[in-house]
Image: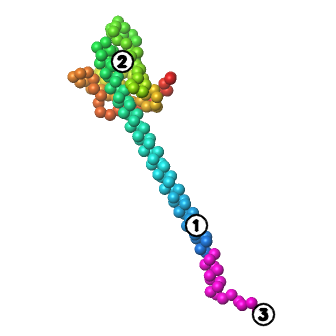
Amino acid sequence: MPLPLPTRRARHGAAAAGFVLPLAISTSMLLLIGSASLHTLALQARLRSQQALAMRHHDDQLQSVAMAFLHSAAAAEQACLLEWPSSLWDGLAAVCPQADPAALRAGELEAITWTLLSWQPEDGLAPARLRLALSSASAAAEFRLTPAANGLQLREGLRRIPAPELAS
């Protein structure tokens, strides 16, 4: 008995069945790649957010340290040093006998250890400038100060500067 010949309909069904599997796999791969891309974007956004938060935290710490520096420098025995650049403080023993330059060059505020990078008093053309670095983090900033009734006052904002390598 002869075998029946396949009809056109049977051949078309076989071809369609062979077409659906590659289409399903391709669609699945496309969805997988899209999902991975969205996941990557979400991770990048999270890292940027964490980095911005860390920068705000360091800025806040630098502001606190600058205020602590100004508070220490406002003491009667230390105020004399603020009339001179910090690079000259060591040679001012005769001019400022009660002053302790080491107390203004470094310090600790709660758990924040800081170092004075430089102090430049107001010179008539430019405002006073204070440059500080956090020892525990790679953060440093320059502050501009204005005269106030009770001493010097920080201007709004700070300018981030490259943090030096500090010996621990």
Task: Specify the quadrant of the image occupied by residue 95.
Answer: top left
Q: Is residue 139 visible?
A: yes
In the image, 165 versus 122, the foreground residue is 165
Task: Find disc 1 in the rendering and name its residue.
Answer: 26
Q: Is residue 88 visible?
A: no
Q: Nearer the viewer, mark 2 or mark 1?
A: 1
Task: Find disc 2 in the rendering and name its residue.
Answer: 85
Does the magenta portion include 4? yes
Quadrant containing the N terminus in the rendered view: bottom right
Q: Where is residue 92 in the image (x, y as percent from the top left)?
A: 36, 10
Q: What residue type is labelled 1?
A: Ser
Region in magenta: 1-18
In the displayed structure, does residue 31 sit left or right of residue 134? right
Cβ–Cβ below 8 Å for labels 2 and 1?
A: no
Q: Where is residue 99 in the image (x, y as percent from the top left)?
A: 34, 11
Q: Residue furthest left?
A: 149
Above or below residue 6? Residue 83 is above
Assign a secondary structure to mark 1: helix
Could you tell me which residue is drawn at 39 percent across and 26 percent down?
Answer: 110
